[in-house]
């Protein structure tokens, strides 16, 4: 209860869900690892240029859903799926969709920072170089812009050629975000981006997420209720592979419709 | 007391490891000790061979005199000791060894005028230089004879080098060109070169040494039979060191003589290194591709597992079996076909259809392929999944992910595989005997003649050279020092090859920034 009470409405009145433009649309989506079902008949719409948080107990399928959104499951031959996911109205599993292009449009930041063993500069330029055809000057500019957007520029501008692995965990996480921003995705998926960070780095990342929401659609997985309340506009509560409740964050945290949701967000798990 | 002992024991050993730690430490020290012993043995025996040690002259109780170097001592059955001397002079005595009971020795002396000659035939001579008969001029004796001989030997050495150069750079290439087809211009050049060599040969004639062995037997020897003349007993430490250095250098830089027991091993060093490098060049790309396919591309099912087990077991197949395979498939199969298609003219004498550098390298590449595959696979498996996903999430295709993230990260593992492959291949002898190594191939397979690298030629190899001198020489005792020296060299060559690869790996690691951390 107390958490829900603590949450002050940050952005004035809550936005009515029906007004939002839909960016990602998941309908009737289910997924099995071998015979083991991980997601069951999910239907939800992720609004454009908003932050949507997925919360739920460990193992409920949050990461699985997130990875389904940019088809990272394609690598795993044991995964079977059903249902549809549409990005801007386009079914992402359609044969004419190039999966590399889809993943560029739907960027992903993983739970543990995973910079490549290259220099900071090369890490950020990695995605740009894949696209090819860019001049060195242009790459320089985009690298700087991305690092600035990720609030990392001031810390690394003097050592862009240093190894990315020499950065701290929080800096690495922001570097990974910068690397993803450099290819200008439309959607950014963040899987517990702050779980390994100290409070100050966490605050920086949260601030970053808020700022990015003006131009990007963000999906955030988190175990931290306060974080979900602080940064997200919408929250989806998952349990056992099913969507339990989904709505504007303020409503969900202050007046959850279902007892299950209330128990979870107040820390009273059945 | 006991408590104190226990406490002392605890202080030195990590808790709870007990005798196992000691056992492990003892076994590692034992293996290190054995290694050090091996190297020490090879180094002293092998390098000692080139030291111009003093020569002793003995007067025996029965009045006989002999001269030579003491080699070893053994007890006699009836008591007392017996000593083995290396007296050389095979042409005079029929043997180069002499056992002398220590009790029979009346006097031991090291006269400064004893000479040791290295000859082109019959091995060394030990005795005295009585006189020097120049081609033109007066008979000289004593010190004057020694100086006359030295001057003559220096001239002869220069001529010999000129002849070798002429033969390697002009005569042999021309001869090979003529073998391939008639060419009047080449034929004329060949006659000319032959004439020049004949002139040089004739200029080497003249000058005779009159020698006397310790027993007093006389001998006349033409000067061109002599390669080097030394008086070890008259040499100071500096001169001896210089002679030792000269000996080592000749061993490293010259071709073998006298059934491989004398002379140097340069062609064998060259052949070994070249063969190993060609092998690495062949095996690394293949092994890496195979490992990438197995680990990154193939469906990870029962079949892949089976293939993996198969590859690991291939590493255990005895090397001679690979030799047989190489002979059957590469030499007769592939080589025979190449001959039929491209070298029809020179059949029935084979070009590629016989053992050679290429087939030997490929056979060894096959032999070491499992090592490279396994090492690379382990490197690939160690790369965290999130690195791959990170690349894919940025819009990389699988190929881009492989070439830009996975393979650079796996480079040290690939080089580790290459290091292991080099270590295994450089010491392998058995398969080589079937696919191209030669007892004597004084011409190295690289020269100034197109195509510069002659893959079809036979080559010499240090390991085989070792085997050959140790088992196929007429006097094993005499060949033993060369065997030791060759063995030492083989170990050193493998060491250098390995260090090169390790250095390369280190260099790449630091370039890819802290890769060793993963
Ligand atoms: N690669 C996989 N193979 C088989 N089963 C998997 C795999 N990945 C996840 N699962 C299973 O799918 C279910 C959902 O996992 P998922 O990782 O999506 O949970 P999560 O909500 O992200 O949990 P957490 O909060 O702990 O990260 C779990 O029961 C898990 O055991
Ligand atoms: Mg998760």
Image: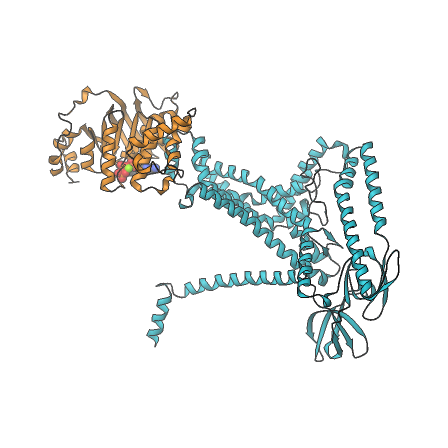
Chain colours: A orange, B cyan
Task: Name the one closer to the observer, A115 or A143.
Answer: A143
Quick one: quadrant of the C terminus of chain A? top left
Residue A124 against residue B231 in the figure, above or below: above
Q: Position of residue A53 (x, y in %)?
A: 23, 31
Task: Please give the count of numbered marks on the rendered protein.
Answer: 0
Task: Classify residue A13 by image quadrant.
Answer: top left
Q: Position of residue A229 (x, y in %)?
A: 18, 33
Can the viewer see residue B226 in this picture? no
- The residue positioned 75% from the left and 39% from the top of the image is B173
Determine the quadrant in which ligand 2 lies.
top left
Q: Is residue A11 left or right of residue B329?
A: left
Task: Classify residue B473 by image quadrant.
Answer: bottom right
Residue B148 against residue B410 in the figure, above or below: below
Task: Name the one closer to the observer, B197 or B174.
Answer: B197
- The residue positioned 39% from the left and 28% from the top of the image is A139
Quick one: quadrant of the N terminus of chain A? top left
Q: Is residue A261 left or right of residue B399?
A: left
Q: Position of residue A120 (x, y in %)?
A: 37, 36
- The residue positioned 82% from the left and 68% from the top of the image is B213
Q: Is residue B129 left or right of residue B237?
A: right
- The residue positioned 39% from the left and 21% from the top of the image is A95
Can the viewer see residue A226 in this picture? yes
Q: Position of residue B9 (x, y in %)?
A: 37, 69
Task: Classify residue B167 by image quadrant.
Answer: top right
């Amino acid at each position: 209860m107390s958490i829900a009470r603590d949450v002050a409405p940050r952005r004035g009145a809550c936005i009515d869900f029906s007004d939002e433009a839909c960016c990602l649309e998941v309908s009737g989506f289910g997924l099995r690892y071998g015979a083991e079902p991980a997601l069951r008949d999910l239907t939800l719409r992720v609004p454009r240029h908003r932050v949507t948080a997925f919360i739920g107990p460990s193992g409920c399928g949050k990461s699985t859903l997130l990875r389904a959104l940019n088809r990272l499951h394609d690598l795993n031959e044991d995964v079977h799926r059903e249902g549809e996911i549409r990005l801007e109205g386009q079914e992402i599993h359609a044969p004419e969709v190039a999966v590399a292009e889809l993943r560029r449009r739907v960027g992903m930041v993983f739970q543990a920072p995973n910079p490549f063993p290259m220099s900071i500069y090369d890490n950020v330029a990695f995605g740009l170089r894949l696209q090819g055809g860019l001049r060195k000057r242009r790459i320089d500019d985009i690298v700087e812009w991305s690092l600035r957007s990720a609030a990392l520029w001031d810390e690394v501008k003097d050592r862009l050629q240093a190894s990315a692995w020499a950065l701290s965990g929080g800096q690495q996480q922001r570097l990974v975000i910068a690397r993803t921003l450099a290819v200008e995705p439309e959607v950014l998926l963040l899987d517990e981006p702050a779980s390994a960070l100290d409070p100050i780095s966490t605050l920086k990342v949260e601030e970053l997420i808020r700022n990015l929401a003006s131009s990007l659609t963000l999906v955030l997985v988190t175990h931290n209720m306060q974080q979900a309340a602080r940064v997200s506009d919408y929250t989806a509560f998952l349990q056992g592979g099913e969507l339990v409740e989904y709505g504007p964050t303020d409503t969900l945290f202050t007046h959850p419709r279902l007892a299950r949701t209330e128990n979870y967000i107040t820390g009273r798990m059945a | 007391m006991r408590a104190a002992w226990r406490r002392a024991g605890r202080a030195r050993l990590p808790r709870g490891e007990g005798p196992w730690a000691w056992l492990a430490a003892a076994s590692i020290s034992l293996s290190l000790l054995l290694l050090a012993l091996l190297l020490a043995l090879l180094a002293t025996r092998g390098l000692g061979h080139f030291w111009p040690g003093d020569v002793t002259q003995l007067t025996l109780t029965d009045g006989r005199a002999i001269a030579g170097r003491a080699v070893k001592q053994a007890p006699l059955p009836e008591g007392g000791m017996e000593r083995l001397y290396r007296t050389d002079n095979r042409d005079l005595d029929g043997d180069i060894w002499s056992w002398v009971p220590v009790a029979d020795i009346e006097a031991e002396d090291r006269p400064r005028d004893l000479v040791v000659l290295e000859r082109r035939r019959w091995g060394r001579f030990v005795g005295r230089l009585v006189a020097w008969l120049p081609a033109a001029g007066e008979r000289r004796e004593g010190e004057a004879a020694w100086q006359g001989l030295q001057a003559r030997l220096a001239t002869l050495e220069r001529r010999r080098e000129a002849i070798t150069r002429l033969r390697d750079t002009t005569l042999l290439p021309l001869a090979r060109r003529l073998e391939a087809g008639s060419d009047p211009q080449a034929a004329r050049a060949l006659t000319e070169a032959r004439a020049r060599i004949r002139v040089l040969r004739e200029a080497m004639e003249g000058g005779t040494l009159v020698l006397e062995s310790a027993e007093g037997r006389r001998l006349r020897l033409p000067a061109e039979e002599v390669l080097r003349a030394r008086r070890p007993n008259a040499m100071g430490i500096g001169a001896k060191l210089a002679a030792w250095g000269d000996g080592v250098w000749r061993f490293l830089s010259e071709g073998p003589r006298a059934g491989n027991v004398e002379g140097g091993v340069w062609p064998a060093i060259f052949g070994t290194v070249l063969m190993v490098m060609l092998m690495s060049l062949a095996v690394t790309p293949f092994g890496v591709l195979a490992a990438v396919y197995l680990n990154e591309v193939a469906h990870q099912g029962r079949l892949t597992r089976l293939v993996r087990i198969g590859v690991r077991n291939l590493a255990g197949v005895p090397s001679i079996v690979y030799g047989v395979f190489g002979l059957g498939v590469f030499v007769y199969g592939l080589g025979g076909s190449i001959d039929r298609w491209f070298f029809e003219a020179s059949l029935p004498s084979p070009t590629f259809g016989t053992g050679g550098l290429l087939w030997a390298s490929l056979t060894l590449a096959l032999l070491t392929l499992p090592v490279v595959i396994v090492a690379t696979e382990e490197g690939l498996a160690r790369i965290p999944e999130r690195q791959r996903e990170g690349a894919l999430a940025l819009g990389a295709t699988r190929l881009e992910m492989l070439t830009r993230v996975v393979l650079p990260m796996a480079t040290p593992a690939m080089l580790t595989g290459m290091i292991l492959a080099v270590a295994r291949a450089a010491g392998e002898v058995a398969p080589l005997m079937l696919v191209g190594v030669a007892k004597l191939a004084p011409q190295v397979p690289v020269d100034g003649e197109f195509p510069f690298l002659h893959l079809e030629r036979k080559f010499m190899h240090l390991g085989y050279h070792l085997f050959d001198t140790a088992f196929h020489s007429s006097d094993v005792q005499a060949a033993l020092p060369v065997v030791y020296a060759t063995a030492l060299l083989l170990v050193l060559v493998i060491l250098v090859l390995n260090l090169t690869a390790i250095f390369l790996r280190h260099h790449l690691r630091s370039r890819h920034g802290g890769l060793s951390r993963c």
